[in-house]
Amino acid sequence: MTDLKQTAIPQNGSMEIAQSESLIQSPAYTPEPHDRQNPNVWDALYLDTAIPVDPIAKAHMIRDLRSWTRAYLLLPIKLIANTLLALIMTVKRLLPFQFSNYVLMHRSAAWFLKHFVSPEACYLIVRHICLGSNIVNFLIENGPDSTIESSKLYPHTVDDLAENAFLEHDIILYNFVLDYSKAQREHPNWLQQVHQKGLSYESIQPIDLNIDFNQRSWLQVLDLESAIELFKVFYSLCLTSDEFERAVLSLEFDENFGCYISQLVGDYNWNHVIANRNPLAPDSSFGSARRLLLHGIITEYLHRHLELRKLARSQPSHD
C-alpha cells in the first residue's frame, strides 16, 4: 500500500526546505553521490525544488522518464499512433452512424496497463484520477455553491479503472465547470463571503493507492507517454467522434482550473507552471497524448500547491 506522504514544514515556514528534505528521504528514489565533473541530470531534476511536487510521485516520474522505451520507442510509437488515429477519425467521420463501447474500452485499458505498462506509469495514472477528485471537491467546498455534487471517483488499483473511470473522470470535469459557472452567476458576492469565512482544505486528503512495484513481468516496460500514445488510438476507436473530441478538449481546462484556485487563495504567482494554455485555441487530437502528459504534471503541481498551503496553515505562527 502506497500512501501520499505528508511532510511537515519546519517552524520557520520554509516550504522549500521541507520539500528538499522529503525528497532526500524518499524511499522511491536514491540520488547518486554528486560528481562535480559529471553531474547526474536525473538527480538534478529530482532534487530541484523550484516547482514543488509530491516526493513519491516525483520519484516515479523520474523513473518513468529514464525508461528505455521512452528513449527508443516513443518516436516510432507516435508515428504509428498518429497514422492509425488519422485513419480511425476519417472513417468514423464518414460513416453514416456512430458507435461506442465503454466497457470494452475500460477493461482493455486496465488489461493493457497491468500487462504492458510499468508500475510507475500505472501509479501516476491511478493517482491522477484521485488528485482530480480532490481538486474538484476543494473547489466545491470553497465555491459559490457547496451543494454541487462532489466527486467520489477514487480508484485504488489498476483494476478499479475498468469501471468506466476515464469516462467518468471527464464527465465529472465538464459537469463541475458547468455547475460552478452557473453558481457563480447566481451568487455574485460568493468570493467575498468565502474569504470572510476562510478556506477549508478538508478535501485535500492523502491518496491511498495499491500498486505492486515488486512483482512485474518482463513485458511491463512501457513508459507513461508511450502508453498514452497507444491508448489514444483505442480510445478514439471505442468512442463516438463527438465523445473523443470532448475527451481531447477536456485537456484545455488546465488554465481555467489554475485560475479557479488562484482566485480562491488570492495568489496567481504560481500560474506560470501551467503549460496547457489558451482554452479557446485548442490543439489537434494528434497532440493529445503529449497534452495529457502535461495535464498530469500540472495536476501534480496544483495539488502540491494546495497541500503545502494546507500544511503551512496547520503550523503554529511565529513572530
Image: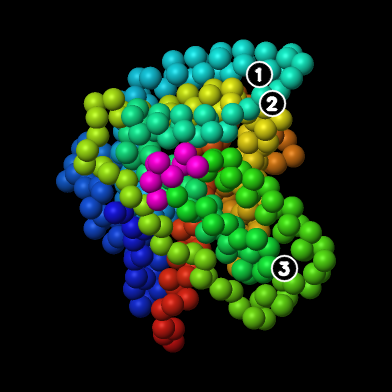
| Residue at x-position 23% and y-position 53% | 27
The kind of secondary structure element at disc 2 is helix
Contact between labelled residues 3 and 2, with CB atoms less than 8 Å apart: no
- The residues colored magenta run 156-163
Q: Is residue 255 magenta?
A: no
Q: Quadrant of residue 195?
A: bottom right
Counting residues from the N terminus, which is met first, the one under dot 1 or under dot 2? Answer: 1
Badge 2 local density, few (<14 within 10 Å), some, or many (20+)? some
Contact between labelled residues 2 and 1, with CB atoms less than 8 Å apart: yes
In the rendered image, residue 30, in percent from the top left (x then y), is placed at: 21, 48
Closer mark to the observer between disc 2 and disc 3: 2
With 169 as the anchor, is 70 left or right in this view?
A: left
What's the residue type where badge 2 is placed?
Ser
The residue that label 1 is drawn on is 89
What's the residue type where badge 1 is placed?
Met
Is 174 located above or below residue 117 in the figure?
below
